[in-house]
Image (tube, rainbow, N blue to C red):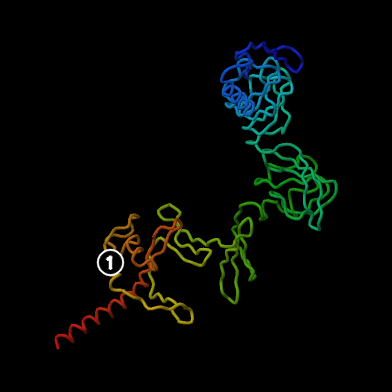
Amino acid sequence: MAYTINKTDGTVVATVEDGALDTSTSVKLIGRNYQSYGEPFNENLVALLENSASTTAPSTPITGELWYDKTNTILKVYNGTNFVPVGVTSSASAPTVGLTSGTLWNDTTNDQLFMYDGAAFDLIGPIFKTGDGKSGWLVDVEDLSGGGTANVLSLYQDGTRVAILTKTAVTLDSTPTGFASASLAKGITFYEDTDSTTFRLHGTAQNALELGGRESARFLVDDQNQTTSGTFGVLNNTGLTVGANSDATFSVTDSDFIITQNNADNPIIFKINQGSTVTSALTITGTADVSMPGQLTCLAVTETSSIALKENVNPISNALDKLVQLTGVTYDRKNGKTKNEAGLIAEEVYPVIPNVVSKDEQGNPHGINYTKLTAYLIEAVKTLKQEVDQLKARQE
């Protein structure tokens, strides 16, 4: 006896004869006494589980059927005519198929949300594109210096906040980027452009173009690159602070001139102009190590070596056996600075005497502390002397 398969609304989907397999829908309808029904039954379960995931839509869908579009990685539902997205479509270009009024599209290129009105996509927001930066009036919540917060209206253009509007005078917890002070007067405060002659309020203003009868251009300001033909001095020991975040200071303590890097674990770097190329000449690292790419010339180098500074002191054994494994070579530096230089190869020394070899940031052998080799040479000489003394004793 044939099965009559009905939809939820009572309409007939198909009539399946005994022993038959109906494929008129996306799932296979199994008739009475159909042989090997396990395979189509399980495939139906998988199709339901994965929402018929495929790069192509089901060929015989029914209204309400779900399909996961693998090409666009989005879940769609059949509305009786087309498969339309269930949620928001995120893509770099506007979708062109399966559109109905109310379809949402997230423009991933410009980070903007659009809604289809039946004819075209209308912009919901924001009004600016991500690549252009924020533009227009926006409400910003600012922390106040005395605690609490305040709402201000900020005017943005292409990502730069160019004005702040507040109905009451406030002092913020920190100075807004591009503004002169954390204190905002009641009304509109403009940011200070690098060229003060081009960004201003055109019309009647409280401030004038002169200060004390002198042109404003004659004064040094704290947010522009300027020069002076006069002498500039800082006549206090606190000295001079540089960097957007007070990164470094030049100061004096007990007549000592001090350069301080204020950022933890960051280096102090001295650079020179070498053949019209600015290059690092000396680096003092955040761990107080000193490195330089050039040659160091000095009268003497003294290393600290007091027993008061050491622990786990152990004699060196087999020094001679280790030294004879090393190979002295001459070489030219690839940077062209040194020719026919004598020395050892760090990669060859490391397996033999690793504690005199330093490594680079990747953990590869990089340098050799030649002065530390002296300890091995001393012990090797002792071993040679002992062998010589033994030979002499045998001859006697």
Is residue 364 rendered to the left or right of residue 53?
left
Q: Position of residue 396 (x, y in %)?
A: 14, 89
Instruction: Tell which of 11 and 140 is nearer to you.
Output: 11
Say what secondary structure mark 1 lies in: loop
Locate residue 82 relative to residue 164 in the image: left or right: left
- Give the quadrant of residue 242: bottom right
Residue under the point 43% across and 52% down: 277
Locate residue 339, reporting x and y percent: 28, 59
Question: Position of 42 compared to 120: left or right?
Answer: left
Mark 1 Cα shell of 10 Å, populated few (<14), some (14-19), many (≥20): few
Task: Quadrant for the N terminus, please.
Answer: top right
Taking the view exactly as shown, the residue that stands out farthest to the bottom is 396
Extreme residue toward the right, this view:
168
Note whether 3 is above or below 361 in the view shown. Answer: above
Question: In this image, 13 relative to 355: left or right?
Answer: right
x%, y% of residue 182? 75, 54
Q: Residue furthest left?
A: 395
In the rendered view, tell whether residue 266 sits above or below residue 217: below
Nearest the eye: 194 or 30: 30
- Picture residue at 30% right of the left edge, 65% below the top: 343
Amino acid on which disc 1 is placed: Gln
